[in-house]
Amino acid sequence: MVQSIPARKVKLSDLKDKFGLRWTEADDFFTDWLGNFPALTAEEIKALDRVKANYRYLLEYPIMESIVKMVVLSPLLDIAGFYAPPYRVTGEADVKVSAVDESEVIQGSIDVLIIQEQLWVTVIEAKNLEFSLTKAIPQTLAYMLA
């Protein structure tokens, strides 16, 4: 019988045991990040400073995930150009990931998914501000396995 596990309850140890994920400290793991990128414009720096200031203000109060997405995530996606072609933004995409022996299935919904044709460019799992960032990592990695 197949056991279903909500993605939000997945732990890093589960992904390590069931899917063979391992930590890496290799500098060249994401070689795309090593490119010679253009410097940010003054306008982009100003926009990022505004997002940072808004985020710091939000940290002072308990806040819902939907507000985090609106105040922090949406401006960052705009600055990165993900609202324009060739990208497509979708939200609440249902995902199922099966373990190798298929006795367990991890299910959940990706908060925001950026797609270029069939390629998943960005997977985002937002959490309320009072949660540690590390709470989103196992869930995001499970989605990336899909």
Image (cartoon, grey):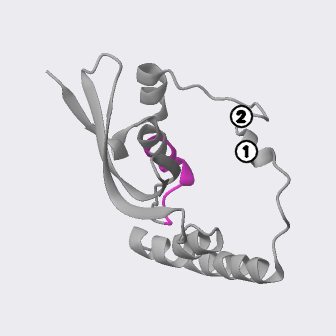
Front-lying residue, 76 or 119? 119
Residue drawn at (40%, 72%) of the image: 66
Left or right relative to 138: residue 91? left
Label placed on residue 29: 2
Tell me where the magenta segment starts and ends, as one range. 129-139
Residue 138 part of the magenta-drawn span:
yes
Which residue occupies the extreme top position in the image? 101
Q: Position of residue 127 (x, y in %)?
A: 45, 60
Does residue 20 sit above or below 12 in this rendering?
above
Give the label, 2 or 1, closer to the camera.
1
* SS at circle 1: helix
Quadrant, the N terminus: top left
Residue 40, located in which quarter of the rendered image? Answer: bottom right
Label placed on residue 32: 1
Residue drawn at (73%, 45%) of the image: 32
Q: Position of residue 75 (x, y in %)?
A: 58, 76
Front-lying residue, 37 or 67? 37
* SS at circle 2: loop
